[in-house]
Image (cartoon, rainbow, N blue to C red):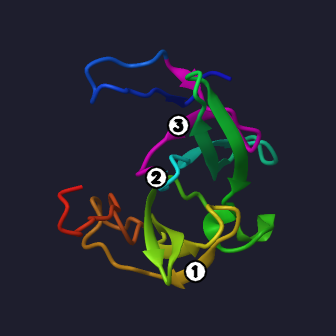
Amino acid sequence: SPAGAFIMYSKDNGQSWSEPTEIQTEVVVGGTAKRGDIAVYSDGQILIPIYGFDNVQSNAYCGSCVLAELNEDGTWNFIRETRMWGATGTDESTYTWETEHAMAVTTLDGQEVTYDLIRRSGKLLISYDRGATWEIVAENIEGGDSWFEGAAEKLQQPGFYKLDGSNK
């Protein structure tokens, strides 16, 4: 692929870093990039939102999320990749160009759940299974004026804030 998305880790609060490891994907096959916030689970697994060229429609962009964990030997285990399909369904008829996913993990009724706030469409999604499936919670969330006149984006630079009193 002409470009890829890579991941690194630090075990000393950012003083030093591991060598970069390319995120392994099958859905996104070229020009892979990561944009948006990664979801971090209590057991150390992470859910990485990525986008790039689609393996089905090679001239189109698509998004996916990769569930991964760091092994004790410092290598990455890429557990599963889920195609986002524009985050509205499970087939090509729902395809949209969604490139930025801000993901966050919280506890709801004793279970870790993942939220995904999506740039452009202004959708808020929830997953109860670490990104394997998604449900729409809200649509058309307005993010203010677009950065240029006539832009289709509903939301620019989505993100979450965690306010739990622990300064984390």
* Pointer 1 with pointer 3, Cβ within 8 A: no
Q: Amino acid at mark 1?
A: Ile
Q: Nearer the viewer, residue 99 or 151?
A: 99
Q: Nearer the viewer, residue 103 or 35?
A: 103
* Residue at the spot 45% in from the left edge and 60% down from the top edge: 103
Label 2 and label 1: CA atoms lie apart by 21 Å
Q: CA distance from mark 2 to mark 3?
A: 19 Å
Q: Quadrant of residue 76?
A: top right
Q: Which residue is mark 3?
A: 33
Q: What residue is shown at x 67% (from left), y 34% (from top)?
A: 77
Q: Amino acid at mark 3?
A: Ala
Instruction: Name the residue tied to disc 2.
Output: 40
* Magenta run includes residue 27: yes
1 or 3: mark nearer the eye: 1
For the point 55% across and 47% down, which residue is it? Answer: 45
Query: Which element is circle 2 on?
Result: strand
Distance Cα–Cα, label 1 vs label 3: 24 Å
Residue drawn 24% across and 55% down? 168
Q: Is residue 145 left or right of residue 69?
A: left
Q: Position of residue 112 (x, y in %)?
A: 52, 69
Q: State which tag comes first along the sequence, 1 or 3.
A: 3
Residue 122 in view in this figure: no
Describe residue 75's horizontal placement relative to residue 102 as left or right.
right
Name the quarter where the N terminus is drawn: top right
Asked whether the residues under the numbered discs 2 and 1 touch, taking CB atoms below 8 Å apart as contact, a structural biologist would say no
Residue 136, numbered circle: 1
Residue 22, compared with residue 105, is above or below; it is above
Numbered range of the magenta stretch:
20-38
Is 88 inside the magenta-drawn segment?
no
**Label 1 residue SS:** strand
Helix, strand or loop under label 3: strand
Q: Residues within 10 Å of mark 2 (few under 14, many from 20)?
A: many
